[in-house]
Amino acid sequence: MPCPMPVIELARHLGDVEVGELLAVVARDPAAAVDVPAWCRMKSQDYVGADTADDGAPRYVIRRLT
């Protein structure tokens, strides 16, 4: 997904998980490495970190706090 779609999809799906649960965004766009943590700070969510999805794509993990 090109920028800004990763954070738009993150915002759209945050309500799909309960408070305290994890949500992952898989995005090959290099801007997501900056945008996802920044979105988490702005929205008071916990950016857990980055790892790699099964297909090798970067994955950004968020814990819902509110």
Image (cartoon, rainbow, N blue to C red):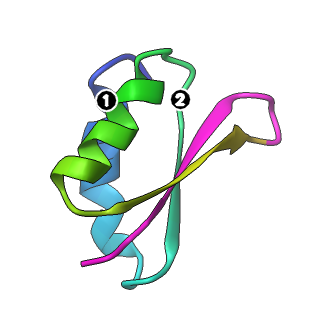
Q: How many dots with numbers?
A: 2
The percent position of residue 2, horizontal first and vertical second, equals 39, 17
Q: Mark 2 points at which residue?
A: 27
Q: Is mark 2 on a helix, strand or loop?
A: loop
When the figure is inspected, residue 50 is found, relative to residue 64, above or below; the finding is: above
The three-letter code of the residue at mark 1 reads: Met
Left or right of residue 46, residue 49 in this image: right
Q: Is mark 1 on a helix, strand or loop?
A: helix
Residues packed near mark 2 inside 10 Å, few (<14), some (14 to 19) or many (20 plus): many
Taking the spot 37% from the left edge, 38% from the top edge, the residue there is: 36
Q: Name the residue under label 1.
A: 5
In depth, the one of 1 and 42 nearer the eye is 42
Sequence-earlier tag: 2 or 1: 1
Residues packed near mark 1 inside 10 Å, few (<14), some (14 to 19) or many (20 plus): few
Q: In which quarter of the image is residue 5?
A: top left
Based on the picture, tell me whether residue 49 belongs to the magenta stretch: no
Taking the spot 18% from the left edge, 57% from the top edge, the residue there is: 43
Q: In which quarter of the image is residue 35?
A: top left
The percent position of residue 53, horizontal first and vertical second, equals 74, 41
Taking the spot 80% from the left edge, 33% from the top edge, the residue there is: 55
Quadrant for the C terminus, please.
bottom left
In depth, the one of 54 and 62 nearer the eye is 62
What stretch of residues is rendered in magenta? 54-66
The answer for how far apart the CA atoms under marks 2 and 1 are is 9 Å
Residues at circles 2 and 1 in contact by the CB criterion of under 8 Å = yes
Left or right of residue 57, residue 62 in this image: left
Based on the picture, tell me whether residue 57 belongs to the magenta stretch: yes
